[in-house]
Amino acid sequence: MTMTDRMNLEGQQVTPTPGTSDQPTLECRGITKTYQSTDPPTHVLNGIDLQVRPGEFLVIMGASGSGKSTLLYSISGMDRPSSGTVLLEGGPLTSLSDTEMSRVRLTRMGFVFQQAYLLANLNIGDNILLPALKANPKDKAAATARVDALMERFDIAHVRTHGITQVSGGQLQRASICRALACEPAILFADEPTGALNSSMTIEVMDALSDVHAAGTTVVMVTHDPSCAARGDRVIYLRDGSLVNSRELGRWTAERAGQREDDLLAWLRHEGF
Ligand SMILES: Nc1ncnc2c1ncn2[C@@H]1O[C@H](COP(=O)(O)OP(=O)(O)OP(=O)(O)O)[C@@H](O)[C@H]1O
């Protein structure tokens, strides 16, 4: 664990939450990313060290262009870092072939984006089922049972047979969360999952992500929104592609949400947000 991981704004040592195992779910060492497609090349990440504890809800924040999405993509196998190592549950990701990486993404990781990216020719239920069937075609009965349970849990069972244009934005994003959980991933990555939603749908979706986290799934989320960030156990702050500070928040509770947001906002302002 790095120094920034252990210190809060006041430079005090903090006790990490929750995490029980010594092995991080995700470990990143010396991650750099340079886009060679531009002239001159664009250096975006400058050697990020990061550990995500089992069951932790980690939030990545920073100004626009600071490298948040690039970091998320580089550590989740959606893109490859230019250098550095990523370990998922102790296994090296960065040395996998593209085919092996795709398999790990499908079976061990879930993804939620700003847009739902569900298929227009499938109904909501079948969209959610698809990755589970792709991961294990022989598992149809078990996968269907899992998907039914997820749709009940996230209150979209009643729109199972609806088309993707026949549900609200909040329902669509909850369907994306169900799809991301259908293969029971070790970790869920979310990139601005509420970026396209109004405030009531944002709360719906963040309640769903808090539920995912409370059930034990490790979550890594990029957001611009301090009220969403306040749901996390820990917020890290990027500036110009470097991890410059980190804030332990402890477990989110609805009762303390307002105070927690105020504290986080004060810290973010101190960081230049
Ligand atoms: N494919 C690419 N090729 C070249 N440069 C890129 C590419 N993708 C991102 N960048 C650049 O990398 C930098 C970081 O982008 P990134 O999207 O990671 O930032 P961000 O913090 O997520 O920003 P935002 O909050 O605006 O989404 C930006 O300067 C961006 O222009």
Image (cartoon, grey):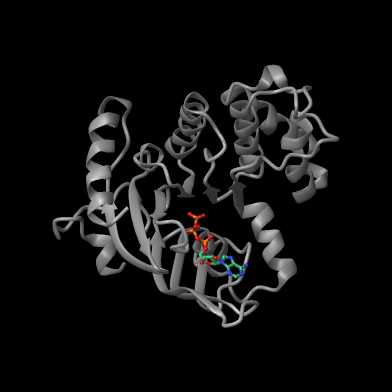
Task: Say which residue appears at 83% left-offset and 34% top-offset.
Answer: 122
In the picture, measured across the screen, residue 21 lies left or right of residue 270, that is right
Q: Position of residue 94 (x, y in %)?
A: 58, 73
Task: Say which residue appears at 25% left-offset and 68% top-offset.
Answer: 3
Identify the residue at the far right of this view. 121
In the picture, measured across the screen, residue 122 lies left or right of residue 238, that is right
Foreground residue among 166 and 66: 66
Q: Which image quadrant is residue 11 in?
A: bottom left
Task: Say which residue appears at 78% left-offset and 43% top-offset.
Answer: 133
Vertical order, 194 against 220 (above or below): above
Q: Position of residue 245 (x, y in %)?
A: 28, 61
Foreground residue among 83 and 86: 83
The quarter of the rendering in which ligand 1 is drawn is: bottom right
Identify the residue at the far bottom of this view. 40
Vertical order, 117 against 159 (above or below): below
Q: Position of residue 41 (x, y in %)?
A: 57, 81
Q: Position of residue 107 (x, y in %)?
A: 66, 53
Dividing the image into 4 quarters, which one contains the N terminus? bottom left
Task: Say which residue appears at 38% left-offset and 56% top-offset.
Answer: 21
